[in-house]
Image: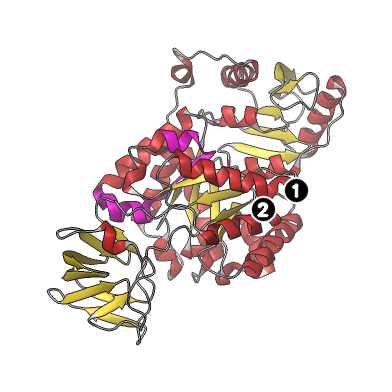
Protein backbone atom coordinates (compact mmCIF):
# COMPACT_ATOMS: atom_id res chain seq x y z
CA UNK A 1 0.00 0.00 0.00
CA UNK A 2 1.58 3.35 -1.03
CA UNK A 3 2.37 5.81 1.75
CA UNK A 4 -0.37 8.39 2.24
CA UNK A 5 -0.15 11.67 4.18
CA UNK A 6 -3.88 12.46 4.54
CA UNK A 7 -5.66 10.45 7.22
CA UNK A 8 -9.04 8.69 6.94
CA UNK A 9 -11.72 8.85 9.65
CA UNK A 10 -14.36 6.11 9.36
CA UNK A 11 -17.61 5.99 11.34
CA UNK A 12 -18.37 2.62 12.92
CA UNK A 13 -21.90 1.27 12.63
CA UNK A 14 -23.91 -1.86 11.79
CA UNK A 15 -22.20 -2.18 8.38
CA UNK A 16 -18.69 -2.18 9.84
CA UNK A 17 -18.97 -3.91 13.22
CA UNK A 18 -17.85 -7.35 12.04
CA UNK A 19 -14.38 -7.89 13.59
CA UNK A 20 -12.83 -9.35 10.42
CA UNK A 21 -14.21 -6.56 8.23
CA UNK A 22 -13.07 -3.87 10.67
CA UNK A 23 -9.56 -5.34 10.64
CA UNK A 24 -9.60 -5.24 6.81
CA UNK A 25 -10.72 -1.61 6.90
CA UNK A 26 -7.86 -0.69 9.24
CA UNK A 27 -5.38 -2.51 6.99
CA UNK A 28 -6.87 -0.69 3.97
CA UNK A 29 -6.22 2.72 5.49
CA UNK A 30 -8.49 3.73 8.41
CA UNK A 31 -6.50 5.89 10.85
CA UNK A 32 -9.29 7.10 13.14
CA UNK A 33 -12.54 5.34 14.05
CA UNK A 34 -15.50 7.57 14.92
CA UNK A 35 -18.10 6.39 17.40
CA UNK A 36 -21.30 8.38 16.84
CA UNK A 37 -23.00 8.93 20.20
CA UNK A 38 -26.18 10.11 18.44
CA UNK A 39 -27.01 6.42 17.97
CA UNK A 40 -26.87 3.40 20.24
CA UNK A 41 -26.63 2.82 23.98
CA UNK A 42 -23.64 3.27 26.28
CA UNK A 43 -22.78 -0.44 26.20
CA UNK A 44 -22.79 -0.42 22.37
CA UNK A 45 -20.00 2.19 22.37
CA UNK A 46 -18.02 0.39 25.07
CA UNK A 47 -18.24 -2.84 23.04
CA UNK A 48 -17.30 -1.10 19.80
CA UNK A 49 -14.31 0.61 21.38
CA UNK A 50 -13.03 -2.79 22.51
CA UNK A 51 -13.69 -4.13 18.99
CA UNK A 52 -11.59 -1.31 17.49
CA UNK A 53 -8.66 -1.88 19.87
CA UNK A 54 -8.69 -5.63 19.18
CA UNK A 55 -8.92 -5.20 15.39
CA UNK A 56 -6.10 -2.63 15.42
CA UNK A 57 -3.94 -4.99 17.47
CA UNK A 58 -4.51 -7.81 14.97
CA UNK A 59 -3.69 -5.42 12.10
CA UNK A 60 -0.45 -4.46 13.86
CA UNK A 61 -1.14 -0.74 14.10
CA UNK A 62 -2.74 1.77 16.44
CA UNK A 63 -5.74 3.83 15.41
CA UNK A 64 -7.36 6.72 17.29
CA UNK A 65 -10.91 6.50 18.61
CA UNK A 66 -13.03 9.65 18.32
CA UNK A 67 -16.18 9.87 20.46
CA UNK A 68 -18.59 12.21 18.64
CA UNK A 69 -21.12 13.72 21.07
CA UNK A 70 -24.73 14.12 19.99
CA UNK A 71 -25.13 17.70 21.17
CA UNK A 72 -28.50 19.44 21.53
CA UNK A 73 -31.51 17.70 20.00
CA UNK A 74 -33.06 20.50 17.95
CA UNK A 75 -35.58 18.15 16.37
CA UNK A 76 -39.26 17.58 15.70
CA UNK A 77 -41.01 14.84 17.69
CA UNK A 78 -42.51 11.59 16.41
CA UNK A 79 -45.44 11.00 14.03
CA UNK A 80 -48.31 8.55 14.52
CA UNK A 81 -47.56 7.05 11.09
CA UNK A 82 -43.80 7.50 11.38
CA UNK A 83 -43.82 10.25 8.74
CA UNK A 84 -45.99 12.74 6.82
CA UNK A 85 -45.70 14.31 3.38
CA UNK A 86 -45.85 18.11 3.48
CA UNK A 87 -47.17 19.95 0.41
CA UNK A 88 -46.02 23.46 -0.59
CA UNK A 89 -48.49 26.10 0.61
CA UNK A 90 -50.00 24.03 3.41
CA UNK A 91 -50.08 25.21 7.03
CA UNK A 92 -48.09 23.23 9.60
CA UNK A 93 -47.66 23.74 13.36
CA UNK A 94 -44.59 22.99 15.47
CA UNK A 95 -46.05 22.60 18.98
CA UNK A 96 -43.75 22.53 22.02
CA UNK A 97 -46.66 21.59 24.33
CA UNK A 98 -47.97 18.70 22.21
CA UNK A 99 -47.78 15.28 23.90
CA UNK A 100 -49.64 13.16 21.33
CA UNK A 101 -47.92 11.88 18.18
CA UNK A 102 -47.78 14.17 15.16
CA UNK A 103 -49.96 14.21 12.04
CA UNK A 104 -50.27 16.14 8.78
CA UNK A 105 -51.26 19.33 10.64
CA UNK A 106 -48.85 19.47 13.59
CA UNK A 107 -46.01 17.76 15.42
CA UNK A 108 -44.42 18.04 18.86
CA UNK A 109 -40.88 19.26 19.52
CA UNK A 110 -37.88 17.74 21.26
CA UNK A 111 -36.56 21.30 21.45
CA UNK A 112 -39.03 23.06 23.76
CA UNK A 113 -37.37 26.49 23.50
CA UNK A 114 -38.18 26.97 19.80
CA UNK A 115 -41.28 29.21 20.30
CA UNK A 116 -39.13 31.72 22.22
CA UNK A 117 -36.39 31.80 19.60
CA UNK A 118 -38.30 32.41 16.37
CA UNK A 119 -40.60 35.14 15.10
CA UNK A 120 -42.83 35.80 12.09
CA UNK A 121 -40.77 35.88 8.89
CA UNK A 122 -38.06 33.48 10.08
CA UNK A 123 -37.21 30.59 7.77
CA UNK A 124 -36.82 27.11 9.30
CA UNK A 125 -35.15 24.22 7.52
CA UNK A 126 -36.12 20.66 8.38
CA UNK A 127 -34.34 17.40 7.56
CA UNK A 128 -31.00 18.97 6.49
CA UNK A 129 -32.75 21.68 4.49
CA UNK A 130 -34.79 19.35 2.29
CA UNK A 131 -37.99 20.93 3.70
CA UNK A 132 -38.33 24.72 4.06
CA UNK A 133 -41.05 26.38 6.16
CA UNK A 134 -41.70 30.05 6.96
CA UNK A 135 -42.89 31.21 10.38
CA UNK A 136 -46.27 33.03 10.17
CA UNK A 137 -46.80 33.59 13.89
CA UNK A 138 -45.88 32.33 17.34
CA UNK A 139 -48.91 31.72 19.54
CA UNK A 140 -48.03 30.53 23.03
CA UNK A 141 -46.12 27.25 22.63
CA UNK A 142 -47.12 26.89 18.96
CA UNK A 143 -45.07 27.98 15.97
CA UNK A 144 -47.47 28.41 13.02
CA UNK A 145 -45.80 28.02 9.63
CA UNK A 146 -46.40 27.78 5.89
CA UNK A 147 -44.58 25.10 3.89
CA UNK A 148 -42.44 26.64 1.12
CA UNK A 149 -40.56 23.53 -0.01
CA UNK A 150 -42.37 20.30 0.76
CA UNK A 151 -41.38 16.68 1.10
CA UNK A 152 -41.36 13.72 3.44
CA UNK A 153 -40.85 14.56 7.12
CA UNK A 154 -40.22 11.62 9.44
CA UNK A 155 -39.62 11.11 13.17
CA UNK A 156 -37.00 13.22 15.00
CA UNK A 157 -35.68 15.10 11.96
CA UNK A 158 -33.49 18.11 12.70
CA UNK A 159 -34.52 21.78 12.72
CA UNK A 160 -32.21 24.61 11.65
CA UNK A 161 -32.93 28.32 11.50
CA UNK A 162 -31.65 30.05 8.38
CA UNK A 163 -28.81 32.36 9.43
CA UNK A 164 -28.54 30.63 12.82
CA UNK A 165 -29.83 31.90 16.16
CA UNK A 166 -31.04 28.84 18.09
CA UNK A 167 -29.46 29.02 21.53
CA UNK A 168 -29.40 25.39 22.67
CA UNK A 169 -26.35 24.72 24.87
CA UNK A 170 -23.59 22.74 23.16
CA UNK A 171 -23.37 20.22 26.02
CA UNK A 172 -26.50 18.44 27.19
CA UNK A 173 -26.96 16.16 30.21
CA UNK A 174 -26.64 13.20 27.80
CA UNK A 175 -23.33 14.57 26.47
CA UNK A 176 -22.00 14.83 30.01
CA UNK A 177 -22.88 11.18 30.64
CA UNK A 178 -21.38 10.21 27.29
CA UNK A 179 -18.11 11.99 28.14
CA UNK A 180 -17.82 9.78 31.24
CA UNK A 181 -18.45 6.67 29.11
CA UNK A 182 -15.90 7.76 26.46
CA UNK A 183 -13.27 8.48 29.09
CA UNK A 184 -13.94 5.04 30.60
CA UNK A 185 -12.47 3.48 27.45
CA UNK A 186 -10.00 6.36 26.99
CA UNK A 187 -11.27 7.78 23.70
CA UNK A 188 -8.36 9.64 22.08
CA UNK A 189 -10.54 12.48 20.78
CA UNK A 190 -13.91 13.92 21.77
CA UNK A 191 -15.84 15.80 19.07
CA UNK A 192 -18.15 18.49 20.45
CA UNK A 193 -21.29 19.19 18.40
CA UNK A 194 -22.63 22.71 17.79
CA UNK A 195 -20.19 24.80 19.90
CA UNK A 196 -20.98 28.54 19.66
CA UNK A 197 -17.89 29.96 21.37
CA UNK A 198 -14.68 29.14 23.25
CA UNK A 199 -16.60 28.74 26.53
CA UNK A 200 -18.42 25.68 25.16
CA UNK A 201 -15.08 24.04 24.33
CA UNK A 202 -13.50 25.02 27.67
CA UNK A 203 -16.43 23.46 29.53
CA UNK A 204 -16.10 20.27 27.46
CA UNK A 205 -12.37 20.11 28.19
CA UNK A 206 -12.96 20.50 31.93
CA UNK A 207 -15.56 17.70 31.91
CA UNK A 208 -13.25 15.43 29.89
CA UNK A 209 -10.24 16.05 32.11
CA UNK A 210 -12.22 15.39 35.30
CA UNK A 211 -13.73 12.17 33.88
CA UNK A 212 -10.36 10.97 32.53
CA UNK A 213 -8.27 11.92 35.56
CA UNK A 214 -8.47 8.50 37.24
CA UNK A 215 -7.06 6.91 34.06
CA UNK A 216 -4.22 9.43 33.74
CA UNK A 217 -5.67 10.34 30.33
CA UNK A 218 -6.25 13.61 28.46
CA UNK A 219 -8.21 13.44 25.19
CA UNK A 220 -7.86 15.84 22.29
CA UNK A 221 -10.93 18.03 21.68
CA UNK A 222 -12.39 18.58 18.21
CA UNK A 223 -14.88 21.44 17.71
CA UNK A 224 -17.47 20.65 15.03
CA UNK A 225 -18.13 23.87 13.14
CA UNK A 226 -21.78 23.56 12.17
CA UNK A 227 -23.55 26.69 13.46
CA UNK A 228 -23.74 30.08 11.77
CA UNK A 229 -22.87 31.66 15.15
CA UNK A 230 -19.57 29.73 15.23
CA UNK A 231 -18.19 31.48 12.11
CA UNK A 232 -17.52 34.95 13.68
CA UNK A 233 -16.04 33.15 16.72
CA UNK A 234 -13.99 30.69 14.65
CA UNK A 235 -10.55 31.73 15.93
CA UNK A 236 -11.51 31.67 19.62
CA UNK A 237 -13.17 28.25 19.21
CA UNK A 238 -10.11 26.97 17.34
CA UNK A 239 -7.69 28.18 20.03
CA UNK A 240 -9.78 26.52 22.76
CA UNK A 241 -9.65 23.19 20.88
CA UNK A 242 -7.06 20.72 19.60
CA UNK A 243 -8.70 20.73 16.20
CA UNK A 244 -11.85 21.48 14.24
CA UNK A 245 -14.19 19.54 12.01
CA UNK A 246 -15.60 21.21 8.90
CA UNK A 247 -19.09 19.73 9.45
CA UNK A 248 -20.57 20.68 6.12
CA UNK A 249 -24.09 19.31 6.68
CA UNK A 250 -25.64 21.51 9.37
CA UNK A 251 -23.31 24.38 8.46
CA UNK A 252 -24.57 24.42 4.86
CA UNK A 253 -28.18 24.40 6.06
CA UNK A 254 -27.60 27.47 8.25
CA UNK A 255 -25.30 29.59 6.04
CA UNK A 256 -26.27 28.28 2.58
CA UNK A 257 -24.57 25.66 0.39
CA UNK A 258 -22.72 28.15 -1.79
CA UNK A 259 -20.76 29.68 1.11
CA UNK A 260 -19.40 26.39 2.50
CA UNK A 261 -16.53 25.65 0.02
CA UNK A 262 -14.93 29.04 0.75
CA UNK A 263 -15.40 28.52 4.51
CA UNK A 264 -13.81 25.06 4.21
CA UNK A 265 -10.65 26.53 2.67
CA UNK A 266 -10.53 29.29 5.28
CA UNK A 267 -10.96 26.86 8.18
CA UNK A 268 -8.26 24.48 6.94
CA UNK A 269 -5.82 27.36 6.45
CA UNK A 270 -6.59 28.84 9.87
CA UNK A 271 -6.18 25.49 11.64
CA UNK A 272 -2.79 24.88 10.06
CA UNK A 273 -1.59 28.41 10.87
CA UNK A 274 -2.48 27.92 14.54
CA UNK A 275 -1.03 24.40 14.94
CA UNK A 276 -4.42 22.68 15.16
CA UNK A 277 -5.66 19.62 13.26
CA UNK A 278 -8.61 19.75 10.87
CA UNK A 279 -11.06 17.11 9.61
CA UNK A 280 -13.22 17.64 6.51
CA UNK A 281 -16.55 15.81 6.81
CA UNK A 282 -20.04 15.16 5.40
CA UNK A 283 -21.11 13.50 2.15
CA UNK A 284 -17.55 13.01 0.88
CA UNK A 285 -18.35 9.66 -0.75
CA UNK A 286 -22.14 9.72 -0.25
CA UNK A 287 -23.00 7.76 -3.42
CA UNK A 288 -20.92 4.81 -2.15
CA UNK A 289 -23.58 4.14 0.48
CA UNK A 290 -25.32 2.27 -2.34
CA UNK A 291 -22.78 2.17 -5.22
CA UNK A 292 -19.41 0.37 -5.45
CA UNK A 293 -17.67 3.36 -7.08
CA UNK A 294 -17.72 7.11 -6.28
CA UNK A 295 -18.95 9.86 -8.61
CA UNK A 296 -16.45 12.10 -10.38
CA UNK A 297 -17.69 15.01 -8.26
CA UNK A 298 -16.95 13.09 -5.03
CA UNK A 299 -13.44 12.26 -6.26
CA UNK A 300 -12.86 15.99 -6.89
CA UNK A 301 -14.32 16.90 -3.50
CA UNK A 302 -11.99 14.58 -1.59
CA UNK A 303 -8.99 15.59 -3.73
CA UNK A 304 -9.68 19.31 -3.19
CA UNK A 305 -9.84 18.85 0.59
CA UNK A 306 -6.45 17.10 0.38
CA UNK A 307 -5.01 19.91 -1.77
CA UNK A 308 -6.38 22.46 0.74
CA UNK A 309 -4.19 20.75 3.37
CA UNK A 310 -6.78 18.96 5.53
CA UNK A 311 -5.38 16.49 8.05
CA UNK A 312 -8.17 14.00 7.50
CA UNK A 313 -11.21 13.24 5.39
CA UNK A 314 -14.19 11.63 7.10
CA UNK A 315 -16.77 9.00 6.18
CA UNK A 316 -20.12 8.83 7.96
CA UNK A 317 -22.99 6.65 6.66
CA UNK A 318 -20.67 5.32 3.93
CA UNK A 319 -18.93 3.07 6.47
CA UNK A 320 -21.54 3.03 9.26
CA UNK A 321 -24.50 1.75 7.28
CA UNK A 322 -23.50 1.62 3.61
CA UNK A 323 -23.21 -1.44 1.37
CA UNK A 324 -19.51 -1.00 0.57
CA UNK A 325 -17.57 0.11 3.67
CA UNK A 326 -14.27 -1.56 2.69
CA UNK A 327 -14.44 -0.47 -0.94
CA UNK A 328 -15.09 3.11 0.18
CA UNK A 329 -11.90 3.11 2.29
CA UNK A 330 -9.87 1.69 -0.63
CA UNK A 331 -11.23 4.31 -3.06
CA UNK A 332 -10.70 7.19 -0.62
CA UNK A 333 -7.11 6.12 0.09
CA UNK A 334 -6.38 6.02 -3.66
CA UNK A 335 -7.84 9.52 -4.20
CA UNK A 336 -5.82 10.98 -1.28
CA UNK A 337 -2.59 9.43 -2.52
CA UNK A 338 -3.12 10.65 -6.08
CA UNK A 339 -4.03 14.19 -4.96
CA UNK A 340 -0.93 14.43 -2.75
CA UNK A 341 1.22 13.93 -5.84
CA UNK A 342 -0.07 17.27 -7.18
CA UNK A 343 0.47 19.40 -4.07
CA UNK A 344 2.14 22.78 -4.47
CA UNK A 345 4.19 23.77 -1.46
CA UNK A 346 6.68 26.47 -0.68
CA UNK A 347 8.42 25.59 2.54
CA UNK A 348 10.56 28.74 2.55
CA UNK A 349 7.48 30.94 2.19
CA UNK A 350 6.00 29.20 5.24
CA UNK A 351 8.89 30.44 7.37
CA UNK A 352 9.21 33.99 5.97
CA UNK A 353 8.66 36.57 8.69
CA UNK A 354 8.04 33.87 11.35
CA UNK A 355 9.63 33.99 14.78
CA UNK A 356 9.86 30.94 17.01
CA UNK A 357 10.11 31.69 20.73
CA UNK A 358 10.29 28.03 21.80
CA UNK A 359 13.40 25.88 21.39
CA UNK A 360 11.41 22.72 20.60
CA UNK A 361 9.39 24.53 17.88
CA UNK A 362 12.60 25.93 16.36
CA UNK A 363 14.13 22.44 16.26
CA UNK A 364 10.98 21.09 14.53
CA UNK A 365 11.17 23.80 11.86
CA UNK A 366 14.92 23.26 11.45
CA UNK A 367 14.35 19.55 10.83
CA UNK A 368 11.79 20.28 8.11
CA UNK A 369 13.96 22.84 6.36
CA UNK A 370 17.12 20.72 6.46
CA UNK A 371 15.41 17.46 5.42
CA UNK A 372 13.69 19.21 2.51
CA UNK A 373 16.91 20.72 1.14
CA UNK A 374 19.01 17.61 1.72
CA UNK A 375 16.43 15.36 0.05
CA UNK A 376 16.34 13.23 3.22
CA UNK A 377 14.55 9.89 3.17
CA UNK A 378 12.71 10.60 6.43
CA UNK A 379 12.24 12.98 9.32
CA UNK A 380 12.18 11.19 12.66
CA UNK A 381 10.86 12.77 15.86
CA UNK A 382 11.39 11.05 19.18
CA UNK A 383 8.49 12.43 21.17
CA UNK A 384 6.76 12.14 24.52
CA UNK A 385 3.80 14.48 24.05
CA UNK A 386 3.52 14.54 20.22
CA UNK A 387 4.01 18.33 19.99
CA UNK A 388 7.10 18.24 17.75
CA UNK A 389 5.48 16.00 15.07
CA UNK A 390 2.33 18.17 15.24
CA UNK A 391 4.33 21.33 14.45
CA UNK A 392 6.16 19.54 11.66
CA UNK A 393 2.89 18.30 10.17
CA UNK A 394 1.49 21.86 9.84
CA UNK A 395 3.78 22.40 6.82
CA UNK A 396 3.35 20.59 3.51
CA UNK A 397 6.49 18.61 2.73
CA UNK A 398 7.06 15.45 0.69
CA UNK A 399 9.50 13.98 3.23
CA UNK A 400 7.59 11.54 5.48
CA UNK A 401 7.57 12.19 9.24
CA UNK A 402 7.96 9.22 11.59
CA UNK A 403 7.09 9.85 15.23
CA UNK A 404 8.65 7.43 17.72
CA UNK A 405 7.06 7.39 21.17
CA UNK A 406 7.04 5.16 24.23
CA UNK A 407 3.47 6.24 25.08
CA UNK A 408 0.59 4.39 23.40
CA UNK A 409 -1.82 7.30 24.09
CA UNK A 410 0.53 9.68 22.22
CA UNK A 411 0.89 7.19 19.37
CA UNK A 412 -2.89 6.98 18.99
CA UNK A 413 -3.41 10.74 19.15
CA UNK A 414 -0.83 11.29 16.39
CA UNK A 415 -2.79 8.95 14.09
CA UNK A 416 -4.79 12.04 13.07
CA UNK A 417 -1.79 14.24 12.13
CA UNK A 418 -1.20 14.69 8.41
CA UNK A 419 2.01 13.13 7.05
CA UNK A 420 2.91 11.65 10.46
CA UNK A 421 3.28 7.91 10.93
CA UNK A 422 3.33 7.22 14.67
CA UNK A 423 5.38 4.20 15.81
CA UNK A 424 5.74 2.72 19.27
CA UNK A 425 9.28 2.39 20.56
CA UNK A 426 10.28 1.96 24.17
CA UNK A 427 13.50 3.96 24.23
CA UNK A 428 16.47 3.99 26.53
CA UNK A 429 17.03 6.97 28.83
CA UNK A 430 20.53 7.33 27.39
CA UNK A 431 20.57 9.61 24.34
CA UNK A 432 23.16 7.77 22.22
CA UNK A 433 21.60 4.38 22.94
CA UNK A 434 18.14 5.77 22.07
CA UNK A 435 19.37 7.21 18.75
CA UNK A 436 20.92 3.85 17.87
CA UNK A 437 17.67 2.07 18.81
CA UNK A 438 15.69 4.50 16.63
CA UNK A 439 17.83 3.79 13.55
CA UNK A 440 17.58 0.02 14.14
CA UNK A 441 13.79 0.40 14.47
CA UNK A 442 13.58 2.27 11.14
CA UNK A 443 15.85 -0.22 9.34
CA UNK A 444 13.83 -3.19 10.65
CA UNK A 445 10.66 -1.64 9.18
CA UNK A 446 12.31 -0.95 5.83
CA UNK A 447 11.88 2.82 6.24
CA UNK A 448 15.60 3.54 5.78
CA UNK A 449 18.46 1.46 4.40
CA UNK A 450 22.20 1.74 4.00
CA UNK A 451 23.26 5.10 2.54
CA UNK A 452 19.97 6.91 3.29
CA UNK A 453 20.07 10.30 4.98
CA UNK A 454 17.47 11.17 7.64
CA UNK A 455 16.92 13.95 10.18
CA UNK A 456 16.15 13.03 13.79
CA UNK A 457 15.02 15.20 16.71
CA UNK A 458 15.00 14.39 20.41
CA UNK A 459 15.34 16.02 23.82
CA UNK A 460 17.95 15.95 26.54
CA UNK A 461 17.27 14.75 29.15
CA UNK A 462 15.18 12.06 27.43
CA UNK A 463 11.47 11.60 28.15
CA UNK A 464 10.51 15.10 29.25
CA UNK A 465 7.46 16.61 27.47
CA UNK A 466 8.35 19.79 25.57
CA UNK A 467 12.05 19.05 25.87
CA UNK A 468 13.02 18.62 22.18
CA UNK A 469 16.32 20.51 21.86
CA UNK A 470 18.45 18.48 19.45
CA UNK A 471 18.50 17.94 15.68
CA UNK A 472 20.91 15.44 14.16
CA UNK A 473 21.42 14.57 10.49
CA UNK A 474 22.36 10.91 10.08
CA UNK A 475 23.43 8.66 7.24
CA UNK A 476 22.60 5.00 7.61
CA UNK A 477 25.76 2.89 7.66
- Identify the residue position indicated by label 1 in the image: 215
Could you tell whether 92 is left or right of 466 in the image? left
Q: Residue at x 37, y 43 (%)?
A: 230
Q: Quadrant of residue 146?
A: bottom left
Q: CA distance from mark 2 to mark 1?
A: 8 Å
Most distant residue in the front direction? 140
Q: Quadrant of residue 143?
A: bottom left
Q: Judge whether 2 appears above or below 359 on screen.
A: below
Q: Judge whether 314 appears above or below 399 on screen.
A: below
Q: Are marks 2 and 1 in contact (CB under 8 Å)?
A: yes
The quarter in which the C terminus is drawn is: top right
Q: Earlier in the sequence, mark 2 or mark 1?
A: 2
- Identify the residue position indicated by label 2 in the image: 183
Q: Nearer the viewer, residue 363 or 216?
A: 216
Q: Position of residue 403 (x, y in %)?
A: 69, 34
Span shown in magenta:
236-258
Q: Residue at x 56, y 67 (%)?
A: 13
Q: Position of residue 246 (x, y in %)?
A: 41, 46
Amino acid sequence: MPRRATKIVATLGPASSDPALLEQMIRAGVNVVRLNFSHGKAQDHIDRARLVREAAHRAGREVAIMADLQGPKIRVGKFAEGKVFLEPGQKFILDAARTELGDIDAVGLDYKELPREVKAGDVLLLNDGLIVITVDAVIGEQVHTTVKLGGELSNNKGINKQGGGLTAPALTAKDMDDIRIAMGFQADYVAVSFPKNATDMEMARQLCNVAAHEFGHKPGLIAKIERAEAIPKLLEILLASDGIMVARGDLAVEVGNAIVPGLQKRMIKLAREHDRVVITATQMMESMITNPVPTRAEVSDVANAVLDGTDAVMLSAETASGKYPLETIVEMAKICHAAEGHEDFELEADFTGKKFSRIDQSIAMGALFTAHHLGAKAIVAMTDSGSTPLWMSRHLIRVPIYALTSKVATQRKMALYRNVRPLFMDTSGDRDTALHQAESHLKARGIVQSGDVYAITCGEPMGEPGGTNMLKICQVS
